[in-house]
Image (tube, helix red, strand yellow):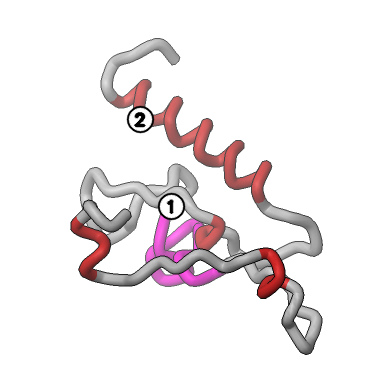
Amino acid sequence: WHKSPLSECADIELALPAELDSFTKPYDVYHPTGSLRMGTTPSNSVVDGNLKLWSADNCYITSTAVFPSSGSANPGMTHLALTARLAKHICCKLGGDC
């Protein structure tokens, strides 16, 4: 990290295990959803059903942010499934094996 250009943007510090238990309140993990919503038209979404930005050519988004709403379970597998589907879509567009 320290040799990367990203080190100019943020510092990373090691959190020792003893410090990890010092939280005074329980917390939850939040997943971004809906901020880059997937939908059927540019007026109700940011990306189409193939995860392509409506406002840009050849630009795709793979993120939990494309989910129109959030569920109660971890979205990791759904995100991976969408990413696999996007990879196949792009491969087909490039003339690869569909």
Q: Are marks 2 and 1 in contact (CB under 8 Å)?
A: no
Q: Going by the image, does 69 lie left or right of 92?
A: right
Quick one: label 2, few (<14), some, or many (20+) residues within 10 Å?
Answer: some
Indicate the position of residue 53 as horizontal and vertical percent values: 33, 55
Q: Residue furthest top?
A: 97
Indicate the position of residue 92 as horizontal and vertical percent values: 36, 21
State which quadrant residue 70 falls in: bottom right
In this view, 85 is above or below 76: above
The residue shown at (23%, 53%) is 4
Q: Which residue is mark 2?
A: 90
Indicate the position of residue 28 as horizontal and vertical percent values: 74, 73
The residue shown at (80%, 63%) is 72
* Badge number at residue 58: none
Q: Quadrant of the C terminus?
A: top left
Q: Going by the image, does 65 lie left or right of 10?
A: right
Give the tally of numbered discs.
2
Which-is-in-front pick, marks 2 and 1? 2
Start-end of magenta stretch: 33-47
In this view, 87 is above or below 3: above
| Amino acid bearing label 1 | Asp
Q: Which residue is mark 1?
A: 48
Q: Is residue 4 shown in magenta?
A: no
The residue shown at (29%, 16%) is 95
Q: Is residue 36 shown in magenta?
A: yes
In this view, 26 is above or below 66: below
Quick one: label 1, few (<14), some, or many (20+) residues within 10 Å?
Answer: some
Out of 66 and 93, give the one closest to the viewer: 66
Indicate the position of residue 12 as horizontal and vertical percent values: 40, 66
The residue shown at (49%, 54%) is 63
Q: Main secondary structure of the magenta part?
A: loop
